[in-house]
Amino acid sequence: MTVITALIADDEPLLRDHLQAHLGRLWPELQIVGQARNGREAVELFEREQPQIVFLDVHMPGMNGIEAARAIARRAMTVFVTAYEQYAVQAFEQGAIDYLIKPFDETRLTDTIGRLKERLRAGAVPAAAVGADGDEAGDRLESVLDRLAAQLRHQASGKPWLQWIKASVGNAVRLIPVEQIAYLRSDEKYTLVVWEGGEALIRKPIRELVDEMDPEQFVQVHRSVIVNLRHVAQVTRGANETADVHLKGRTETLPVSRSYLHLFRQM
């Protein structure tokens, strides 16, 4: 008989113990291989123990639960635990992964256990909650996790979403309203900002800008490209799971790499 194992990650010791105690009563066959205090410890514990199930608190110091889920990727069934319904619950439901709202009760936890057991009985690989490579549900979930990770990082910073970008245009310094930006494209050191009024170069990499811009409006479609969804006219599929973004009122196209193609599956 295969032993089913799980780990619990939460920055509050009492809540970790509370969840483990409830699991012990409701699913005595489940073996808890350890507890983690943050996302980094959760990932390290997962790599060492390789459990089939992980219970991850969303808001943890350092690496949060969403980032830990991205690191664990498709190697385990994930249940998120959160005290914040807000955007998180809706996103989790869209991503078809399970969640528990703190403080949870045994009825809700029993439902979660039932879903986990069903996946196991169906003979699914441990990553059933996240989807297999190329699976549309899995791709959709990755998109959800990307947005949630960006939102949580931004929440932790305490800063509002970026509203203006300062750029040198000729001899002047221009404040470019973010909502007017069609896309950003970068090389290693500079980023080209293309907006309704023109173009400008700024000395800031894409990897910094993507965390400062509202993920509901701006999405990364390539390692060097961020596009404003409000400026997208259509997306044309290409070879080898790639695509091109066509913009409203512009002749240039932008590349969509395979890693980001799931963003446009419904378009």
Image (spheres, rainbow, N blue to C red):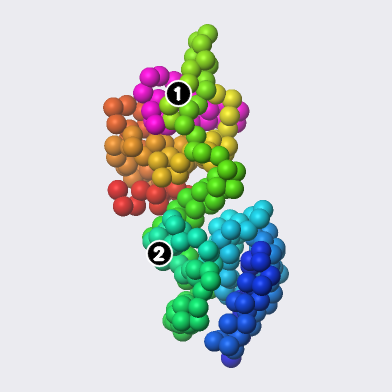
Q: Is residue 139 above or below residue 242?
A: below
Q: Nearer the viewer, residue 159 or 224?
A: 159
Residue depicted at x 55% and y 45%? 154
Position of residue 77 measured from the top left corner of the image (x, y, whole percent): 52, 71
Which residue lies under the disc numbered 2?
93
Which amino acid lies under the numbered mark 2 shown in the image of this protein? Glu
Q: Which residue is mark 1?
A: 176
Which quarter of the figure has residue 89? bottom left
Mark 2 or 1, nearer chain start: 2
Going by the numbered disc 1, the residue's amino acid type is Ile
Which SS class for mark 1?
strand
- Against 135, residue 216 (above or below) is above
Residue 2: which quarter of the image? bottom right
In front of the other: 116 or 136: 116
Find residue 52 and report its horizontal and vertical position in percent.
58, 75
Q: Is residue 180 magenta?
A: yes
